[in-house]
């Protein structure tokens, strides 16, 4: 009898446990069904592409006319106007238009379009200090030309972009150009010397069916070599009769062709030059203001003017102006989402950026570290290229030490200075 009672109690406990599990499972199912039946969840995040950006046709038209489209931007509910301003002021943010460069845009556009239409070659040398909109303007030109090609307003052509900073050596420009022209991006056996020979033969051989090629060479200063062959070929190939090569070269040094080809006749190449002057404060004001036109936040006009005037007095660099005002917005945002960006915020941002860790490090550097920096600047100024051999820097450093009556350090010590 006791055994029977124990069996009954065990079966009752199992039934109650199974019933509890069934109730919990049923309640969970009811919660899931109620949440799924209450309607689709609210979408969070960025708005749809159709609502956030205009049509491709309108973008192409605005890129050519340089008129900023009126776009109603939808923002996330918890995203403030100051946070949106920070995104728009970032240097990596692509604007809908490039203000204050309409004349340069039309000149580059006409130069390239005429040669693509006629099937001839040519070379344009674009120069200017950093932050003057050189590369952005040329990319806008390429975008407009590609749009016309899609609408069959222009003959078919290829567009190739080469960045000197992205190459392991200057001669790799030959390989990258040859792969782009032949669509052989996976050819790893191609050497720079062989690619140069093939390119020279290609541009000197008549071929009526060959398409015109438009090449943007950015950071041309980085393609400097002792023999000066890379830059010379890039300037010379477009002048060949059967090349059908349109070259647009961008550099920070205005007299780079004369410096590179000092012992050659640079005038016969027929370069068309287009200098980009540094921005004035009115232009910087317009650039910063255009980034904020779609944001309803409160930005004091005198704050933008102060930022523009400070940058124009030093360098005229648009990227510097965007960085300073972006930092001003961050300072104002830390005080509250509805804070107005004022002169005080801009002044504080300028002081912070002028006392950067790099500047502080230079101010507290030892004597030989400062002399080494002077040696680097001397070599850059002499060669016209921001690149120097360590052996040349050692000799320049020793010369400075002798002039100042300071004992020169050893090569290993200078290697440590260079590493720091």
Image (spheres, rainbow, N blue to C red):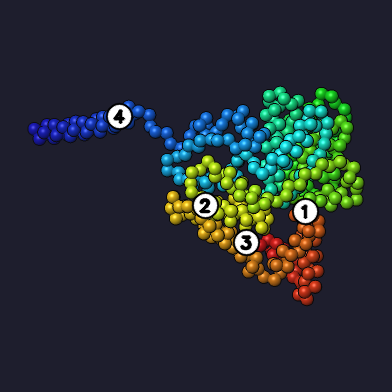
Task: Please indicate whether residue 73 sits to the left or right of residue 77 in the image.
Answer: right
Question: Label 2, label 1: how many angstroms apart (C-alpha)?
Answer: 41 Å
Q: Are marks 3 and 2 in contact (CB under 8 Å)?
A: no
Nearer the observer, disc 4 or disc 1? 1
Look at the image and tell me in which quarter the N terminus lies. Answer: top left
Q: Are marks 2 and 1 in contact (CB under 8 Å)?
A: no
Q: Which residue is located at x 70 percent, y 28 percent?
A: 148
The quadrant in which residue 212 appears is top right
From the viewer's side, name the closer residue of 408 and 4.
408
Do we see residue 320 in this rendering?
no
From the viewer's side, name the closer residue of 379 and 56.
56
Residue named by callout 1: 385
| Label ID, residue 34 | 4
Question: Label 4, label 2: how many angstroms apart (C-alpha)?
Answer: 50 Å
Residue named by callout 3: 358
SS assignment at label 4: helix
Look at the image and tell me in which quarter the C terminus lies. Answer: bottom right
The quadrant in which residue 413 appears is bottom right
Do we see residue 111 in this rendering?
yes
Residue named by callout 2: 300
| Label ID, residue 258 | none
From the viewer's side, name the closer residue of 48 and 314.
314
Earlier in the chain: of badge 4 and badge 1, it is 4
């Amino acid at each position: 009898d006791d055994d029977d009672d124990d069996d009954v109690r065990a079966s009752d406990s199992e039934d109650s446990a199974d019933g509890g599990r069934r109730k919990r499972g049923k309640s969970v199912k009811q919660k899931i069904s109620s949440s799924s039946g209450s309607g689709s969840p609210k979408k969070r995040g960025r708005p749809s592409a159709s609502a956030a950006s205009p049509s491709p046709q309108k973008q192409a038209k605005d890129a050519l006319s340089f008129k900023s489209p009126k776009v109603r931007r939808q923002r996330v509910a918890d995203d403030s106007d100051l946070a949106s301003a920070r995104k728009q002021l970032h240097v990596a943010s692509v604007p809908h238009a490039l203000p204050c460069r309409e004349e340069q845009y039309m000149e580059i556009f006409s130069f390239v379009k005429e040669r693509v239409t006629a099937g001839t070659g040519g070379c344009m040398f674009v120069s200017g200090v950093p932050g003057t909109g050189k590369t952005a303007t040329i990319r806008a030109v390429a975008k407009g030309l590609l749009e016309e090609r899609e609408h069959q307003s222009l003959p078919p052509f290829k567009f190739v972009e080469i960045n000197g900073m992205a190459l392991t050596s200057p001669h790799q420009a030959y390989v990258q150009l040859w792969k782009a022209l032949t669509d052989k991006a996976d050819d790893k056996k191609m050497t720079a010397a062989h690619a140069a020979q093939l390119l020279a033969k290609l541009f000197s051989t008549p071929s009526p069916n060959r398409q015109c090629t438009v090449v943007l060479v950015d950071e041309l200063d980085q393609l400097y070599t002792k023999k000066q062959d890379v830059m010379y070929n890039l300037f010379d190939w477009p002048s060949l009769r059967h090349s059908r090569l349109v070259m647009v070269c961008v550099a920070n040094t205005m007299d780079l062709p004369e410096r590179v080809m000092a012992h050659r006749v640079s005038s016969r190449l027929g370069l068309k030059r287009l200098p980009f002057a540094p921005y004035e404060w009115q232009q910087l004001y317009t650039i910063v203001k255009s980034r904020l036109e779609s944001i309803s936040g409160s930005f004091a006009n005198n704050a933008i003017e102060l930022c523009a005037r400070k940058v124009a007095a030093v360098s005229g660099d648009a990227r510097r102006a965007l960085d300073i005002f972006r930092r001003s917005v961050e300072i104002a945002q830390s005080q509250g989402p509805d804070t107005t960006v004022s002169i005080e915020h801009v002044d504080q941002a300028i002081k912070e950026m002028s006392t950067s860790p790099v500047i502080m490090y230079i101010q507290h550097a030892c004597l030989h570290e400062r002399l080494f920096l002077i040696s680097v600047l001397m070599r850059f100024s002499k060669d016209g290229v921001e690149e120097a051999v360590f052996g040349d820097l050692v000799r320049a450093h020793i010369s400075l030490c002798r002039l100042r009556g300071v004992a020169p350090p050893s090569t290993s010590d200078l290697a440590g200075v260079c590493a720091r």
